[in-house]
Amino acid sequence: MHANNHSIKRVAVLLTALSLPSAVMAWPWSQDMMNQPSIKPQEGVMTPFPHRSVPVMGIPTKVASRDEAKDLVNPIPLSAASLKKGRTLFRIYCAACHGLSGKADSPVSGKIGAIDLTDDYVQKTLTEGWVWGTITFGSFVMPAYGVPGEQGGSNDLSVEERWHVVNYVKNGLVKESQVAAK
Ligand code: HEC
């Protein structure tokens, strides 16, 4: 009777010990793969590229501000595929503030002063490079989507993704909102 009681207690202690860490995902091996000695993206000093090497995507990214970006030529040709990518990204990254239609009609557009992207100001006055630069470096209130470090993070859009968004803003947004209005 006594011995029996003991072993029940022992089993109970063992079960508690086993189940506690798993409740918080704290097994030593839960993070082993994550915390290995490796260089993570954007971490540490990068080895300089060998002399005369060319970026794989062939797209220059060496502009430091929106002003410098304004005359960049869009390297992504306009195509159905690019518009589709741009549209998807726009709806994820931009619509919360600028509205799905781009017409500053989301619930927060007015509160933060997001502008109508279908206006002549964006459609005609601003260059494609400037729009790309706005996405990359942010604006006054608008956040940056292409600056690593403090201002950026998991929200970052790649260089190409930003050009797809430009293609959509400049070539898909107005057409789509006209179709929707009919
Ligand atoms: C957090 C809200 C927010 C998000 C998200 C946002 N914007 Fe904006 N955007 C603004 C506001 C506010 C302004 C006007 C004030 C300013 O320039 O910061 C603006 C201005 C702009 C302008 C005009 C810049 C100029 O020179 O006047 C463009 C173009 C633009 N946004 C495009 C985009 C695109 C494309 C996206 C998605 C990648 C996006 N925005 C995401 C808030 C946002």
Image (cartoon, helix red, strand yellow):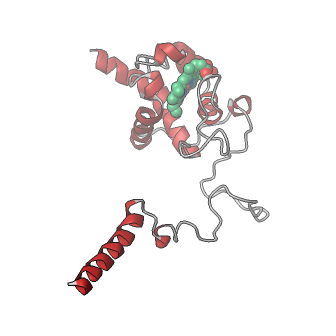
Q: Where is residue 161 in the image (x, y as percent from the top left)?
A: 52, 43
Left or right of residue 155, residue 49 in this image: right
Does 132 sit above or below residue 109?
below
Number of disc labels: 0
Determine the residue located farthest toward the bottom in the rendered image: 3
Determine the residue located farthest toward the left in the rendered image: 1
User: Which quarter of the rendered picture does the C terminus lie within?
Assistant: top left
Q: Which of 27 and 37 is in front in this view?
A: 27
Left or right of residue 4, residue 40 in this image: right
Q: Position of residue 115 (x, y in %)?
A: 52, 16
Q: Where is residue 154 in the image (x, y as percent from the top left)?
A: 54, 46
- Residue at 68% across, 58% down: 43
Residue 115 visible:
no
The quarter of the picture where residue 87 lies is: top left
| Rendered-image quarter of ligand 1 | top right
- Residue at 43% across, 17% down: 103
Does 86 sit above or below residue 33?
above
Q: Nearer the viewer, residue 141 or 182?
A: 141
- Residue at 54% across, 15% down: 113
Q: Position of residue 116 (x, y in %)?
A: 49, 16
Q: Nearer the viewer, residue 146 or 179?
A: 146
Determine the residue located farthest toward the front in the rendered image: 2
- Residue at 59% across, 26% down: 142
Residue 45 visible:
yes
